Amino acid sequence: MSSANATTNTKNKRHIQKLIVVALLAAAIIAFFAFDLSHYLSFSYLKENQLQFHEYYQANPITVSLTFFVLYIISVTLSIPGATLLTLIGGAIFGFFWGLVLISFASSIGATLAFLVSRFLLRDSVQDRFAKHLTRINSGIEKEGAFYLFTLRLVPAFPFFMINLLMALTTIKTSTFYWVSQLGMLAGTAVYVNAGTQLGQLQSASGILSLPLIISFTLLGIFPLIARKVLSVLKANRVYKGFKKPDKFDRNLVVIGAGAAGLVTSYIAAAVKAKVTLIEKHKMGGDCLNTGCIPSKALIRSAKFKSHVSRAKEFGFQTTDTHFDFKEIMQRIKRVISKVEPHDSVERYTGLGVECLQGEAKITSPFSIEVNGRTLTTKNIVIATGARPFVPPIEGIEEVGYLTSDSLWNIEILPKRFLILGGGPIGCELAQSFARLGSEVIQVDRNSRIMKREDPQVSEIVQARFRHEGIDLRLQHQPQRFAIIDDNKTLICSNKEGENVSIIFDELLIALGRKANVTGFGLANLDIPLTRQGTIEVNEYLQTKYPNIYACGDVAGPYQFTHTAAHQAWYASVNSLFRGFKAFKADYSVIPWATFTDPEVARAGLNELEAKEQNIACEVSQFEIDDLDRAIADEEAHGFIKVLTVPGKDKILGVTIVGEHAGDLIAEYVSAMRHGIGLNKILSTIHIYPTLAEANKYVAGQWKQAHQPKKILHWLKKFHQWRRS
Ligand SMILES: Cc1cc2nc3c(=O)[nH]c(=O)nc-3n(C[C@H](O)[C@H](O)[C@H](O)COP(=O)(O)OP(=O)(O)OC[C@H]3O[C@@H](n4cnc5c(N)ncnc54)[C@H](O)[C@@H]3O)c2cc1C
């Protein structure tokens, strides 16, 4: 027989065996329901026959025990609902100790048999089919399987039978499954058997108020909480193994990084009188103040002024002219930074009670940080080290040289042919600003549109404006390499037709996203896991693998905004300082953001694109801003407000605004969404005339119009006819 034939025979044999097992299982389950065996698994049945059971058990202890033991195993193997009830019944018949012994072994043996059946029937096909997705789970199970199963067993939140069936699909060993189940379920079983013993003694309604019964049921209720606490202590002990915890700590909290996230974290800690140290290796204020939001918004303002001047005729002026020195624009940006600087300064924070240290921090253990040769001990650490521009390893990039949002602010000469790689928010804001100041901007993106997270309609409006203002938009262009050709800095890209295109430029700006700062300060030594995006992995409380080490801001993601960094900082600070008493899950239910192009684009919640991707049904109400009096008066009559709502309900799912001051206008919707306010309430709010904010009300009006009570209006029409007659 050939080896191929042998394999086919083995497969067929296994297939038949599987069919037999399925048939036996099905027959057993059908028999259970057909003979109404569930009737015997009820507490009322036990109560009705309690005396007989008791007498029979006294007369035949071994037979009754054995029968119960076998029945218990069968019911668990078949995953028949009622294990909890059987446990209570076991307690009632056998008393605490003998009941616990019988049920502990029967439940573990039954669980292991159910596990084996599920493994025999399903594991191979599941592992084959989902091999790629299961690699990580399998390696996790190999390392942590026993502990993971133990946690599932100890906290009875996950259905018992599901654990049996699902764990069978992993690579956990049968022997490990058995002993961990036996150990993990012991405490829970004891609590239920104990409750059963009390129920067994319940003879009348007055018994319900007996102290032992109340204690037993209280135990039943609080057991999951106790189990969870025990688990978190066990987990904590595991991660801290090998580190010496100091007897006393110098500080309650050490914060690494003085950007938005670190500043707000330490501000809150100092406000609640904790001893907090903030360490910054570069400049207080981080990216937002020094190289991000503030300089970019200052540049946008100057560029906007220039664009208004060039639109002078629209405002009724015949001629206007601007002469400027780019250096002075850059100096203005520095002036703006220095005016904001005091808000984030060492002086201010020291005054608030934060100890500010200049230096590079290194985490040496979960309880100690090294800075400038000193070791600080601390009860908690918050990592707020931010992110940096991502520079792709494109051939020749170092040869031609490049700017990023870090280095851009030091240039003194306006780039002539300015190549900007990236069509995200930063690339777009800077492309338009430089184009307005007079650079010949070529913006390259590999996607078919800029601002790809927004609805296509948004991208189209911004793209049209960019092209109108002279930006050379090259979409679906994939950079291949940089080179200096005939003394010209050149980018060679492939376009959507697959042809090579050469773009000559004088300066290059890379705006292709930002990478979290996760190296150089001891994370690897502590084996702190990262996400696929390269940010630090945190739970909903912003804790890393070490419960006393938190991360927030750009380094933790998932958002990279100053306001989200500050929002997370509150959770990191409060959770780290008050852990054990109260912890809060970071709330990302309504996250707004804006891209400060002209027109501005602002969003909160879902857009149409995401609703479609996530299969969420929604209604769309849209108001065109070109109809708004104030926008017309301001020569800014363009853009729209789009509100997504739950079909037939006054519940807002998301808002997109495109237009002048979109980033300010959206605040009303952010509050509404945050506090569950609907469009009816926005419609009934007085908005000042004439303002751009009126558009918020008008879109609510459009929604209302679409939800007119047609029947009532029909009868009202008849009513008014009758009044006229
Ligand atoms: C051009 C540009 C424009 C932007 N515009 C906006 C905007 O309009 N609105 C908005 O919301 N967001 C904007 N952002 C994003 C915003 O700047 C960031 O989301 C925000 O700065 C994140 O704050 P953070 O505290 O997490 O990190 P950061 O501000 O990056 O701060 C991290 C700090 O940690 C320090 N640090 C790192 N490692 C160590 C160490 N080992 N020891 C000591 N110190 C260390 C760094 O020096 C840095 O100061 C913009 C970003 C850029 C680049």
Image: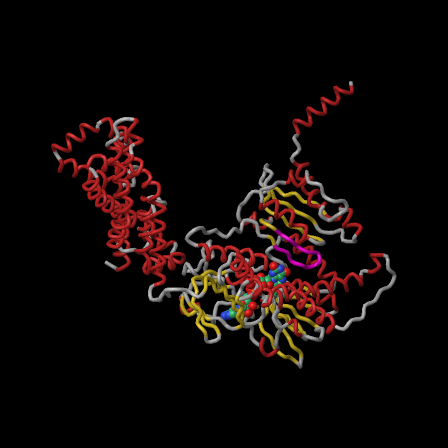
Q: Residue furthest left?
A: 59
Left/right placement of residue 414 relative to residue 117 reads right
Expressed as whole percent of the image width and height from the top left, the position of residue 452 reads 60, 57
Residue 523 among magenta residues: no
User: Residue 595, relative to residue 441: is it above or below?
Assistant: above
Residue 149 rendering spot, x and y as whole percentages: 32, 52
Q: Is residue 596 magenta?
A: yes
Q: Quadrant of residue 421?
A: bottom right
User: Where's residue 217, x and y in %?
Assistant: 32, 38
Residue 26: name its quadrant: top left
Q: Percent x, y for residue 549?
A: 44, 61
Query: Principal SS element in the magenta part?
Result: strand
- Horizontal side of 718 relative to 215 (left or right) equals right
Quadrant that contains the C terminus: top right
Can residue 9 be seen from the camera position used here? no
Q: Count of labels shown?
A: 0
Applied colour scheme:
secondary structure
Question: Residue visible at 28% across and 52% down?
Answer: 11
- Residue 508: tell me if it is visible: yes
Q: Is residue 492 above or below residue 424?
A: below
**Quadrant of the image containing the N terminus:** bottom left
The magenta segment is 593-603
Quadrant for ligand 1 reads: bottom right
Residue at the extreme top: 725
Q: Residue furthest bottom?
A: 487
What's the residue at 47%, 70% (across, down)? 519
In depth, the one of 570 and 59 nearer the eye is 570
For the residue pair 337 and 116, the one nearer the viewer reads as 337
